């Protein structure tokens, strides 16, 4: 599933960072390139302790070969991961208006309509959905690069039902969510009240419905 998501992401957002001649496109490509390089560097650095530990069990030439192989594999994997995360960031950045800033991202589980809420997040639980808060709106994303909906804070009402966050929009309930570990619904409810008071009037671009929950 993770590999399929990665392939879809590459196909969907490749054009977001390449083939643009304007200043914004140049800056975007630079940020992606920088993230790719640093991702590779960080991964290579992570292989050093493993290589050093192996020196006690291998001859010097074996240790050198091991360092080179681990460094190359780790650097490549880190560069690919760094690039993908940077491209996702650029896709989310493109949805923001001038002067708008991203504030936070929260992994969430969607609660299907009419079903009991799943238990709170465990450490290794997986979800493909996340909520992003900005200075002007709340957004739901899948895989961090596929937008599901986006609504101005003035269009939304947030409420807490136990450990479940309920988000209501102009047409009704947009979704019920279980938030990632260490985040409680009341935190977003309070943030939404503050941001709603500061948000500019007028609706933001949004999709009419939320995706079906798995």
Image (cartoon, helix red, strand yellow):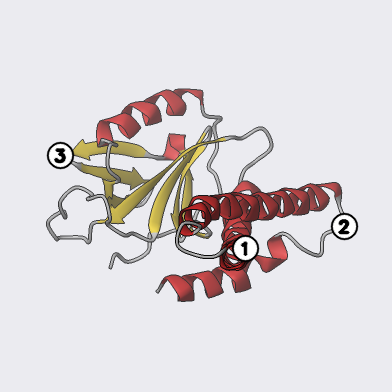
Which of the labelled discs sits on residue 182, or is there none? Answer: none
Secondary element under disc 1, as helix, strand or loop, is helix
Tell me which residue sits at (22%, 50%) in the image.
Answer: 122
Neighbourhood count class around disc 3 (C-alpha, 10 Å): few under 14, some 14–19, many 20 upward: few
- Indicate the position of residue 213 as horizontal and vertical percent values: 29, 64
- Badge 2 or badge 1: first in the primary sequence: 2
Residue that label 2 marks: 21
Which quadrant does the C terminus fall into? bottom left
User: In this rendering, would 159 be left or right of 162?
Assistant: right
Q: CA distance from mark 2 to mark 1?
A: 43 Å
Task: Determine whether 87 is above or below 135 in the image.
Answer: below
- Indicate the position of residue 159 as horizontal and vertical percent values: 25, 37
- Residue, far left: 116
- Badge 2 or badge 3: first in the primary sequence: 2
Q: Nearer the viewer, mark 2 or mark 1?
A: 1
Residue that label 1 marks: 64
Residue that label 3 marks: 162
Task: Determine whether 123 is above or below 210 in the image.
Answer: above
Neighbourhood count class around disc 1 (C-alpha, 10 Å): few under 14, some 14–19, many 20 upward: some
- Indicate the position of residue 162 as horizontal and vertical percent values: 15, 39
- Badge 1 or badge 3: first in the primary sequence: 1
**Residue 101: which quarter of the image?**
top right
């Amino acid at each position: 599933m993770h590999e399929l998501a990665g392939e879809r992401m590459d196909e969907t957002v490749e054009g977001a960072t390449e083939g643009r001649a304007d200043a914004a496109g140049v800056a975007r490509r630079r940020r992606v390139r920088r993230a790719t390089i640093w991702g590779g560097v960080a991964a290579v650095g992570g292989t050093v302790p493993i290589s050093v530990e192996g020196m006690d069990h291998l001859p010097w030439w074996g240790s050198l070969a091991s360092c080179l192989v681990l460094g190359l594999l780790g650097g490549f994997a880190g560069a690919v991961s760094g690039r993908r995360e940077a491209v996702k960031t650029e896709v989310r950045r493109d949805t923001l208006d001038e002067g708008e800033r991203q504030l936070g991202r929260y992994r969430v589980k969607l609660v299907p309509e009419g079903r009991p809420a799943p238990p709170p997040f465990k450490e290794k639980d997986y979800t493909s959905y996340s909520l992003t808060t900005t200075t002007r709106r709340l957004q739901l994303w899948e895989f961090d690069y596929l937008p599901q909906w986006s609504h101005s804070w003035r269009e939304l009402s947030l409420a807490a039902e136990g450990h479940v966050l309920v988000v209501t929009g102009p047409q009704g309930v947009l979704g019920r969510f279980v938030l990632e570990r260490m985040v409680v619904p009341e935190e977003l409810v309070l943030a939404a009240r503050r941001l709603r008071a500061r948000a500019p009037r007028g609706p933001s671009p949004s999709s009419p419905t939320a995706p079906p929950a798995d």
